[in-house]
Image (tube, rainbow, N blue to C red):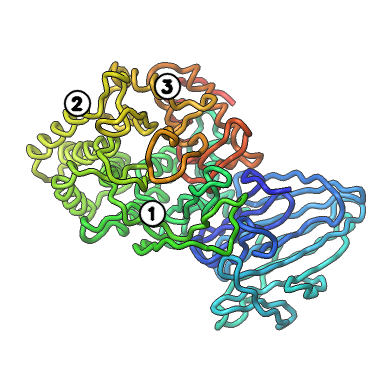
Amino acid sequence: MKPHIEDYALLSDTQTAALVHRRGAVDWCCFPRFDSDACFAALLGDREHGRWLVAPEGEGEPSRRYRAGSLVLETEWETRDGKVRVIDFMPPRRAAPTIVRIVEGISGRVAVRSELVIRYGYGRVVPSLRRLDGALVATAGPDAVVLRSRVPTTAENTAAVSRFQLRAGERVVLTLSWFPSHAELPAGIDAGESLGATETFWRDWSSRCSYRGPYRDAVLGSLVVLKGLTYGPSGGIVAAPTTSLPESPGGERNWDYRYCWLRDATLMLLALVHAGYREEASEWRAWLLRAAAGDPDEIQIMYGVAGERRLPEWVVDWLPGFEDSRPVRVGNAAAAQEQLDVYGEVMDAMYHARRHEVGASLAAWELGRHVLGLLEQRWREPDEGIWEVRGGRRHFTHSKVMAWVAFDRGIKLCEEFGREGPLERWRAIRDEIHAQVCREGWNDQLGSFTQSYGSLQLDASLLLLPQVGFLPPVDPRVRRTLAAIQRQLSSDGFLLRYRSEEESDGLPAGEGAFLPCSFWLVDALAFDGQHDEAVELFERLLDVRNDLGLLAEEHDPRTGRLLGNFPQALSHIALVNSAITLARTVMAPRG
């Protein structure tokens, strides 16, 4: 049976992540960082591209859950011979990155199999296996992992295999730690102590959540995912821990999301602040300022987890892809695109950081002034837009609106917080952009704002116009645009970004409903006073989550399956912010 994206669970040590299939296989993991080469790549291929299976040898149906407020995963199997539990987790990084798998007997006597297939370099490089100090070490080039367990391990066809039986109350621990192949073997860990420390880490972090509104459990679950997608040393938050999970099975809309997008800046900041995570918001803002520091002419739309600028895109042609979806890409060429909305996101994040007392920074304001100086010259130019199209630059309406946001927030930073800048000039530019968007971005025939100037296509990003303050929610143009988007971009009530079969974005047509856009629709309905409709859609979106509360980028309403990279930060950010919107507009506790 082929795996589905929703079959996977997330483990994280806040520097890298692993995906565990419900049947017990770690099918994806990159050591030592989110964006490192994968040593388990079965997610995009098969067993021979690397995986770590720990599961009963007999038939059994698994059930699973996260321990409360954490990414400690429990999976239980009920078999003919008894019941067994596997506890999977990654201890928050203090030494070597490690996956811990604790197998416990619950009842009867159950035969269990561990099969470790290491393949470095995204499934291509077969390591040598050797025993050292009672452990099994797999080495190739710069990479090495050490497998430790008290049960015997044998080499079978370049795999490390263990078989053992467990009665009620018995426990077997398996740990896998990565280290540079030139370094000494990392010390082993006490699994029980490490499990306790990991649960304490997550429990303490979750206890800081100050959100007490409706859907609190869903909000906290999404915040835990966002923490798991945070690169601890820098505060950067990756869009997803995976690459090339398809937006349409068998298609080529397959991208590497293991990087940090400036576009997520404001939405991420607000989600963290409103939930009480000011320290994380401050770290995210600091990452943002470091990444964008220097010549504003060189600002990119995305960066590596530590702020790296070079993210060259290449094809891993030996991997067949998830459900034969090719090409499998590493790196992201969109990093070199021109996207004017990014400048608005940077300025908006700066403004909200001050407004919510995340912290003042003269260096941040100097960067902001430089950004606005550059935007004065560039805002009239076409760009690739929020969706990073590969079909040529256009005058995207959303991009122009975000240019307006940049100047609006610069003006407000001066007016509300005493910053200095050429206010009269900025006000004149702000007014000019506003007038142009209302003139060129509006289409009388459609009765709606459109994706780009002169276009007849709609775009779900236009739902953000009232959220960013460009026009009030009650403006007739906003309401007509909302109605048009619901009519033309709806897929069983969820929203497409745009009609890919009608829009030349440089790629073949075909993708699912975009979950962040569907949450933006929740917000738009709530702002418009359609509270019942907003709540109904939000609860339908909650039902799209997998059994562990995880969301991908997209959803196929026809099949009920998740699509795209997983779990997706922007989807979880949007969930948090929509719950907060409902708490403020509907004010009725639900769920």
The residue mark sitting in front, 3 or 2, is: 2
Residue at which label 2 appears: 439
Circle 1 crowding by C-alpha within 10 Å: few under 14, some 14–19, many from 20: some
**Which is more N-terminal, label 2 or label 1?**
1
Name the residue: 27% across, 29% down: 469
User: What amino acid is at disc 3?
Assistant: Leu
**Location of residue 307 in the rendering, given as x and y in whole percent from the top left corner:** 36, 61
**Which is more N-terminal, label 2 or label 3?**
2
How far apart are the alpha carbons under marks 1 and 2?
40 Å
Q: Quadrant of the C terminus?
A: top right
Q: Does any portion of residue 346 appear in the rendered image? A: no
Q: Is residue 51 above or below residue 339?
A: below
How far apart are the alpha carbons under marks 3 and 1?
32 Å
User: What amino acid is at disc 2?
Assistant: Arg
Residue at which label 1 appears: 283
**Which is more N-terminal, label 1 or label 3?**
1
User: What amino acid is at disc 1?
Assistant: Glu
Q: Secondary structure at mark 2?
A: helix
Q: Are marks 3 and 1 in contact (CB under 8 Å)?
A: no
Name the residue: 32% across, 40% down: 356
**Location of residue 243 in the rendering, given as x and y in whole percent from the top left corner:** 52, 55
Residue at which label 3 appears: 525
Name the residue: 35% across, 42% down: 386
